[in-house]
Amino acid sequence: MISIFNSAQKEKAEFILNHPFARLSNLRLHEIQDLAVVMSYYSCKITGNAYTFVEVESLLKDGITSKRRYEDANILICIYEVLISNMEFIHKEKKQVIIDGCTLLGMCHAVHEREVFNVNILRELLQKQQLYIDPLERAVFLHCNIAQLQPFINVGSHLARMVENLVLMNADIIPVYSSKDADILNYRKGLINFYETGNYSLYADYFLNKQIERIKEIE
């Protein structure tokens, strides 16, 4: 097993896992819904979706579409529905969503994607994830590798982020993302560095630091 975090990152992970402000179970239902809106906007902004955040809120909360491409609205709605259904299930039922091939295929079908590639490699990734006891390490492992593998055409990066979210939520951790241009640039740099070198460190720093920033802001 390849260790994902270095010693400094392991200290950050321990801080996050033990901090009450990181707990998903502490959120109220309307906060869960707001979080799903933010996560949908973030995931789509990374891939060039033209909707502004205000337009995304109007679309997902009030059903008001903007004069944008139909495809942009459709992918936002589909991602939101997948996220909110899983978030509310975990939050209300206090149960985990199993992350396996069937779950991933179901998530991709929800966003109208039916072609599956690299199935054997995907199976190996899903088996290897079990070696990582720390859910934060597991989240980074799955995110980076699924994003690189692109097992489902056109939705690979969205799927990678949704899986990362599920791992965190299963561990009662609030997924944290930023739609700031500088943060998205750091996200991309971390991911590209993994693609080129196989090193998780740059993405792991971004991932952990965003969690800690949110906790510090609340404190």
Image (cartoon, rainbow, N blue to C red):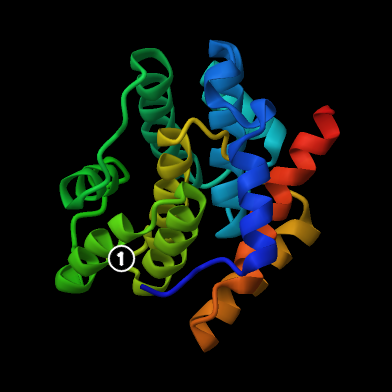
Q: In this view, does 133 lie above or below 174?
A: below
Residue 136 in picture, x, y percent from top left: 51, 51
Q: How many residues crowd mark 1 within 10 Å: few (<14), some (14–19), many (20+)?
A: few
Looking at the figure, which quarter contains the C terminus?
A: top right
Q: Where is residue 180 in the image (x, y as percent from the top left)?
A: 77, 51
Q: In the image, is 212 to the left or to the right of 157?
A: right
Depicted 17 relative to depicted 61: above or below: below
Question: Please, is residue 154 above or below residue 168 in the view?
Answer: below
Relative placement, left or right, of 216 versus 134 is: right
Kind of residue sitting beneath label 1: Ile
Residue 39 visible in the shown view: yes
Please tell me whether mark 1 sits on a helix, a strand or a loop. Answer: loop
Residue 77 visible here: no
Q: Where is residue 6 in the image (x, y as percent from the top left)?
A: 61, 69
Quadrant of res 126? bottom left
Q: Which of 158 and 219 is in front in this view?
A: 219
**Which quadrant would residue 79 be assigned to in this image?**
top left
Q: In which quarter of the image is the N terminus?
A: bottom left
Closer to the camera in the image, 75 or 141: 141
Q: Which residue lies furthest to the bottom in this view?
A: 197
**Residue shown at 23% from the left, 66% from the top:** 122
Q: What residue sits 54% from the left and 40% below the top?
A: 40
Residue on which the image places disc 1 = 153
Is residue 209 or residue 45 the one in the foreground? 209
Q: Where in the figure is residue 84, as x and y percent of width and height?
A: 43, 26
- Residue displayed at 61% across by 63% down: 204
Residue sitting at x 34%, y 69%: 150
